Image (tube, helix red, strand yellow):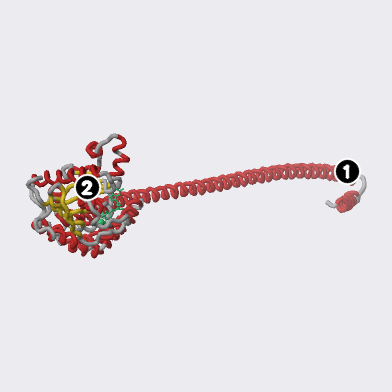
Amino acid sequence: MEHCTQINLLLIGKSGNGKSATGNSILRRKCFRTSGSALSVTNKVDVEVGKFVGVKLKVVDAPGVCDNSLESKEGAELVVNCLQQAIYLCPDGYNAFALVVKFGSRFTGEELATLSFLKQVFGENFVRDHCILILSGGDIFEYEVKSEGERLKDWCSRQTGTFKQLLDECGNRIVLFDNFTKDSYVKRKQILKLLKEIAQLGSRGERYTDMNFRNARHSREKLKQENKFASVKEESFIETSYLLDKLEKVQSSDDHKMKISPLEKILQKDSQLLKALKESDGDTGTMEELIQRLKSIGAIANDEKSKSIRLAAEEEKVRRQKEELQAEKLKLEQQRKEMERMTDIERQKAIIEEEKHRLEIDKMRKLQEEREARLRKEALEAKEAQARKLEQEEERHRENRESDMLTNAADFASSFVPYAKPLFSVGKGIYNWWYGK
Ligand SMILES: Nc1nc2c(ncn2[C@@H]2O[C@H](COP(=O)(O)OP(=O)(O)OP(=O)(O)O)[C@@H](O)[C@H]2O)c(=O)[nH]1
Ligand SMILES: [Mg+2]
């Protein structure tokens, strides 16, 4: 420590982490204003000096980085200007940056955003080359951890995740600060530990000077750009999320043909946004995260589109095959009906034929019967005629015989009686007239 007569220390970190309180502890007097409020109390750079074990201490308390300063262009610019001012306040440069984190607060979200903001202001390597972690809330640590018999070193070795990464990045340079302690031994011990860490850091390299700050100009430009395009970024973020939502909705649909057009629209919008973002980015990398996001949305939408086109074509093929099958089925059904109709006609025809046949048989039978009847009648008539003829002949024979007998009798009588023959003729005439012959 002997060779180092003055130490310049810059207190940085998230708002409310205890920068001002730590500054007071280091200088052993209440020179910086502290507060419990969430909003940054320190809104301008404060410089205070003191002495400890013969070493001059110049402590600069910078405004904290909070959500407000990260979200608005003005807030960010204000913090950057203050930090720039802090750099100018120490033309010799800083022996160290005291990056204050609070014991017990989770190192996520805002803490990470603060760290990345500070890296953009001071340069990507400022944590690795110039930072010492101050873990404020040493009293709570004492109560929660030390009472369990664990030391800071052991506690640090137990840490995981981003806090562990931060520890690694700053070479495990960490000092616990109890800003409430009344114990002068503890008060001195923590300052000494800090000075020891600063000394070790000094032996490793250069102070952080205006030169380093100027070198970090590019990342600050990027930060400025980021703020300048904060609204573009926000709008693009919303549009990207909207696009992602749309893509998810389209992806969940089963109608591949209907998916194609919305996917094309998504791709069109994606490339428009990508183009606008690339223009806004201007090779600063500010919009890189969103650009990558849009690129992956585009890639997914493209894959989905080609998949949908392929599946839609297959579906169309299946649909056509189905239609063909349906038509074939219809045709077969018609053929079956036609066959049934034909069979019906054939059956009807057969019935008619049969009926016709039956009628013909009936007719023939009737004719046969009539013929038989006629023949019978004829036969009967012939028989009757025969009988009548026979009767007539018999009658004639009998008449002849009678006539012969009469003739013979008349002849016989005429041999005795002169007019017997004419009398017989008259009598025969009367007889025939009487019997109608
Ligand atoms: N218990 C406990 N509280 C602390 C300790 N150090 C700081 N605090 C409290 O943390 C709160 C914030 O402290 P500040 O020193 O104002 O924090 P800061 O980082 O300067 O805040 P800004 O100036 O707003 O950026 C105050 O209520 C302090 O009392 C500590 O070691 N132990
Ligand atoms: Mg403060």
Q: Secondary structure at mark 2?
A: strand
Residue 175: image location, x then y, percent: 21, 44
Relative to 276, residue 380 above or below: above
Q: Residue at x 88, y 43 (%)?
A: 409
* Number of numbered discs on residues: 2
> Mark 1 Cα within 10 Å, few/some/many (few <14, many 20+)?
some
Residue 419 badge: none
Return the residue at label 2: 134
Return the residue at label 1: 409
Q: Nearer the viewer, residue 196 or 423?
A: 196
Q: Residue at x 34, y 48 (%)?
A: 318
Q: Secondary structure at mark 1?
A: helix
In this rendering, does residue 120 appear at all?
A: no
Q: Quadrant of the N terminus?
A: top left
> Mark 2 Cα within 10 Å, few/some/many (few <14, many 20+)?
many
* Front: mark 1 or 2: 2
Label 1 – label 2 distance at C-alpha: 196 Å
Q: Nearer the viewer, residue 285 or 171?
A: 171
Residue 235: image location, x then y, percent: 27, 62
Which numbered disc, 1 or 2, marks the residue that appears first in the sequence? Answer: 2
Q: Quadrant of ligand 2?
A: bottom left
Q: Residue at x 32, y 55 (%)?
A: 36
Query: Of the residues shown, which amino acid type is indicated by label 1?
Result: Ala
Quadrant in the rendering for residue 62? bottom left
Quadrant in the rendering for residue 277? bottom left
Residue 416: image location, x then y, percent: 92, 45
Residue 430: image location, x then y, percent: 89, 53
